[in-house]
Image (cartoon, rainbow, N blue to C red):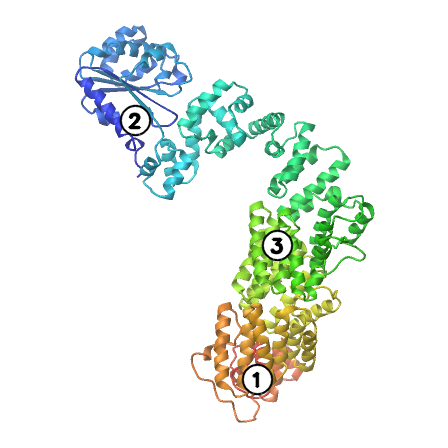
Amino acid sequence: MWGSPMLTERTGELARLSEALADCERGTGRVVLIGGGPATGKTALLDELPGLVGDRARLLRAVGSRAERNLGLGVVTQLLDAEPCVRDRLAPLDSRTWEEVGEQLLASGPPLVLAVDDVHFADSASQRVLLYLRRRLASARLLLVLTEWDRPHLAREPLHAELVRQPDHRIDLRPLSEAGAAQLIQDRGDRAATAFALTGGNPALLTALAEDGLGVGPRFRRAVLDCLTRWGPDFLAVAEALAVLGDAATPPLVAELRSTSAPVVGPVLEALEAAGLLRDQRLRHPDVVLESLDSEDAACLHTRAAELLHRRGAPAVEVARHLAAAGAVPGRWALRPLRHAAEQSVVDDAELAVRCLELALKACEDERERVELSAALVRAAWRINPALADRHLGPLAGRSDLGWREAVPVVRLRFWQGDPAGELLRATRARAGAPHPRAAAELRIATEWIHGGLADHVPLAADGTSWQRTAHLLETWASGAPSDALRAAEHVLQSCAHDVLPEAASAAVLALDHTGHADRARHWCDVLTDQARRQGATTARALITAVRADMSWRRGDLIAAETQAQEAMRLLHPQSWGVLVGLPLSTAILANSALGRHDVAADLLTRPVPEQMAATTFGLHHLHALGRHALATGRTLAALDAVERVATRMRGANAAMPTTLPWRSDLAQAYLLLGRRDEARQLVTEQLASASGGVRVRAIALRVLAACSGGHQRVSLLGEALPLLERCGDRLELARALADLSQAHSELGQLSNARLVLRKADQVAKACQAEVLPHRVRDDLGTRPPREVASTTTPLLSEAERKVAELAARGETNREIGRRLHITVSTVEQHLTRVYRKLDVRNRTELPAELSHLDDDSGDLLQPL
């Protein structure tokens, strides 16, 4: 298994022991002293003696112990356990002088090897015996092998000093090199380098690490603590102080924290460094030591550390970390560093800011100061989790005397809860005057993005500043001015280093993406994601991940869209998302519907959402996703209900708000499935006459208008839509438009063109992994040439079959169809069976796509909407 520590980088030491043994055999006694730091292999080296000595000498071993230092001749007793004859001659041992004991041990016989581990702990009587033996080495076949702790700054006791003075061989054991560590654990490369960095080459720690599978596990943690506890209480006490103080640790500060003196601390630090437990006077594993502390002891040490650091003028964050770890405020002096630390760390370490503010709030007695602390706490907690921020809202709820600094975090939380916070904004404006231009702009962008407009009579912009123009970002986006939208969005996003509102940043990224600046939008997504991850800002990270999912969906990258939407919902619990859950949830529904995962999409639609979401822009997104899912599963009436509700909301929306949903096209498609062609045409014509919506919405409208048209006009409209879709990069809509164009060519008898375009549609659809083409068409691509257009004018379906098929396509059950047409359920089933066979479809969910252009038998390449 793992190699013995003594077989690694210890061959020189073994050679010196062998040399001393040979001298002993020749009649010249020797003393070998082995020293080293904790767990550097002193005992393990002694363990090699039996194999080295063999039958060449008598080997007697003993171990000194701090607990047995007052036990007379305790070490000698251990030595004599292997020499029962000598022990019997000396019995009772406590009545013998040390000279008598020494003489009996030197009695004639084979050479003698005495190995005493931790000789500094040997009792004084045993040390006298060993000293007696040492003085007779010149004429005795005796080898003394002694080990001691290497503590050069501490004076040895007289007997011990005399015993180990000027040994014949001194062996100083040090931690292994990196190459030695690799040899010990029988590994190379990165794992060996990591093992060396974790252990400093300490053989005991390396062995424990190997037993844990080269990971920090229970054996390794136990080995670290054993190294610290075996050498006395001062070692563990110093290690605990080092662990608590961290990078602030200095020998004087450690000494003061442990109420001892620097001369005691210095040697301990040197011994621990020599053993590989420290690196540059810092513990390699402070977490192991901290976890071993009793919670009460840990709190006392952290409180004491905070007081000492505060007295020395340490930075507020440094002091506050100890107060937060202690979970206590030892006096009013602590409020100031707690507040300052929260302000300094709210961007980069929101969790610390929350802990600091919670402590300060508990100890604060001033009412006004409590309001300020509560607002700061809500602001910091929101970065981690809006639900956590809501739990701290209590002292601020219902107050009308807030300044802008206290009101802004409350307003933001209200936005997420579906409340435009108009009353609070007006009250704050009346009391505190106009907000800072930047705060006004960010709040305006956020409320317009979430709620579709400002609350009545709430001015949120200041005149005469660059932020005044930026505040109108969404209006600029809606007006279709890409250069102005670029300037406004970049102004918002370039302020991200100064902690811009994530809602405003998200709206700015989407504005870039919708106005033709997709590369800049992706760049800022990366910047915002990296920043949020680095700062631990979970809320901002979840929000930008949801924005990225929406962008992926509109590119037809369905797998990425679904993955990113699910990741966004994993980062924040649905309760924490509030009304903004509609953004990732809608994207997940749309992506799964397009992927043909209708059961997954249906399950997502059953998830509860806040009632307030219905009145927000994300409520519209959710309705849009519901409508698209209903269309994809052939539930035409359900789709019609959803898209009509979207249309009603959109017709009453603020005209200055950007139209990102193709709601007119959705409604037109539902009308087409119900045979209301003129109404469908009117809707998409209205959309094409509007300047809002951008390239993608226009291209979708052209595709649906083509579905309302026929012949060469249909081909022309689709030809206009295709470059727009390629320009905006929506592969899913491109696949649908290509499938439509193939059908149009087929209807005109241009079968070669139809087949060529259909293959391209299939390629694009496969790239999206989307279900765009009917199964029969996809199957036909590689199996048979297209049929010639039928010359007969005989309808493909009979009148009765068409009526049944149309009602089934609307989502009615067989029983409902039977009652409406006054026929039996069995007759309905027979009609549907013939319809499926004639149209070459598998079930009623494919009927809407097949019926939308079914005027007569015009071939087998039929358009799915």
Residues tagged 3 and 2 counted as in contact (Cβ below 8 A)? no
User: Looking at the rendering, in which quadrant would you find the C terminus?
Assistant: bottom right
Label 1 residue SS: helix
Q: Residue 553 location, x and y as percent?
A: 57, 64
Q: Is residue 829 left or right of residue 40?
A: right
Kind of residue at disc 3: Leu
Which residue sits at x=63%, y=64%?
514
- First reached walking from the N terminus: tag 1 or tag 2: 2
Q: Residue 721 location, x and y as percent?
A: 59, 76
Kind of residue at disc 2: Leu
- First reached walking from the N terminus: tag 3 or tag 2: 2
- Residue sitting farthest toward the right: 430
Residue that label 1 marks = 831
Which residue sits at x=40%, y=40%?
194
Residue that label 3 marks = 543
Residue that label 2 marks = 45
Q: Nearer the viewer, residue 353 or 340?
A: 340
In which quarter of the view is residue 83 placed? top left
User: Looking at the rendering, in which quadrant would you find the N terminus?
Assistant: top left
